[in-house]
Image (cartoon, rainbow, N blue to C red):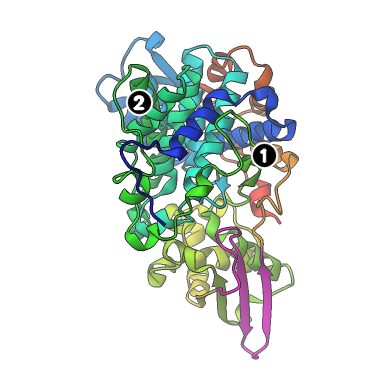
Amino acid sequence: MSIDTPHDRPDTIATTLAGFTHRMQLSAVPANVSLRARHLMLDAVGCALAARHEDFAGRFERAAHAMPGADVPAACTAGVIGFSRRLPLRDATLLNGVLTHGLDYDDTHMAGVIHLTVSVLPALYNMAAARQASGAELLAAYIAAVESGARIASVVRSGFHGQGFHPTAVVGAFASALAVGRLVGLDPQGLVDAQGIALSLASGSLQFIEDGSWTKRIHPGWAAQSGITAALFAQQDIPAPHAPYTGRYGLYRSFLDSSRQAEVDLSLGTAHLDADGGATRWELENIAVKPFPMCHFVHASADAAIALHRQGLDIAQVRDVEVAVPAGVVQAVCEPLAGKRRPASDYDAKFSLPYAVASGLARGRLGLKELEPAAFTDPAMRALMDRVRYVEDAQSTFPRHYSGEVRVTLLDGSTRVHREAVNRGHAERPLSNADVVEKFMDNATLHFPRAHAEAVRDQILALDRLASVRSLETLLATDPAPQAGRRAAPSLAATH
């Protein structure tokens, strides 16, 4: 399929998403979609609060404060979730993206293979608070941007991953530009310009997969920061490319090789929505909430392993473990196999299929506690990981579903098999809003009092009636009590 756009022809994806973002009315959004949007935001904030005492959270926070210009008057600063120390707005936005995404416990749009909330929400949260925008204004911008970002990512059918780019980082810049553009009142042409500027700011490499490094944690916040920059530049009428997606050097040509360009379906970029602000299908309903703080690609296999554990599997009798996974996830969680069998950090472990399956088989759980070094470096766990291998699953419907099947062969030659064709949390097998609230409360009370968690919950779920986002920002910019320590890992993450 050709993705060239002649210089005198508009980029239909850019113009349609701009019109939709500008004209969508919150009153026209179905009540269940609006409510789910608030629960997705609640889930992301809970992930940030759970990350508060993680090593990465402290290091990134200190690094942000070490940047020149971080010491500015309080009136010029913005709030950071779980920290009382404030930062300049774009630095706070970057850090809030790190915190919401850092545990890899945040939501995923399945077809786009992208984490949208953790870029769009940080971009809006600090900007809305600075402008004293209402919760309804934030909510409407969030919904419009998530709908747009899901479609931008879905066009490539996971092709960005194959090319070595992280779609959360790349597409997040465009979605955040649309979100902030709506918040600051850009007209449709201004929103096209914001997308054009975002094209030069979008970035994000998957190289972190090779060694478990921390750069992935930066991606959503950087995308959010880029979105703010793009929207505010567009507000000042900075000339920008008008074909950011389909142009000769647009997104889909620059970030995909020729073979992957052939797989592009441009119709998905505007499917079921129009430039008048209407939508006949809401992709927000296809966003999956994670039951495990791991890469989404391992979830079905982990659940299959947990199911076998609950059948009374004797690990000492296991000779071989074969895991059938979609071909599209192999490079992220299966290879290099020797490295995946020896995770050296929590981030290594989050992207290790052998570890996810071994923990499920041996312990029947896979929560935050299982991502502590003692858990994944345990000799018995390493011995079991050495028996885990993968095969490509010809029956998988990836990327629609992230399937997983575990086949255990015992020493006596008998086998135990369990298949999860649809990963738990998927729109066809969703975690309910009540499940999301339970997950949030578990996460938010790891380091903060229950009363604080309840106050945050109540404000976010009533966001459509919140007079000013400033009150939520003030509530969240709070340190844990000095004596607060980590309690047991969240129950929802560790149970089926």
Q: Is residue 291 above or below residue 466?
A: below
Q: Is residue 140 magenta?
A: no
> Residue at image x 68%, y 87%?
414
Quadrant of the image for the N terminus? bottom left
Circle 2 Cα neighbour tier, 10 Å, few/some/many (<14 / 14–19 / ≥20): many
Distance between the alpha carbons at the discs numbered 2 and 1: 31 Å
Q: Where residue 79 sits: x, y (%)?
A: 46, 20
Which label belongs to residue 229? 2
In the rendered structure, the answer to whether residue 28 lies left or right of residue 139 reads right
Name the outermost residue toward the left. Answer: 68
**Mark 1 Cα shell of 10 Å, populated few (<14), some (14-19), many (≥20):** few
Q: Is residue 400 magenta?
A: yes
Camera sees residue 98: no
Is 350 located above or below residue 479 in the figure?
below
Q: Residue at x 46, y 58 (%)?
A: 351
- Secondary element under disc 2, as helix, strand or loop, is helix
Bounds of the magenta span?
393-421
Q: Secondary structure at mark 1?
A: loop
Amino acid found under the numbered disc labelled 1: Thr
Percent coordinates x, y for residue 386 in the rendering: 47, 75
Is residue 475 placed above or below 483 in the rendered structure? above
* Pick the front one: 369 or 88: 88
Q: Amino acid at mark 2?
A: Thr
> Of the numbered discs in the image, which one, if any, rests on residue 280?
1
Give whichever of discs 2 and 1 has the lower sequence position. 2
Q: Which mark lies nearer to you, 2 or 1?
A: 1
Lateral position of residue 166 relative to residue 17, left or right: left
Looking at the rendering, in which quadrant would you find the C terminus?
bottom right
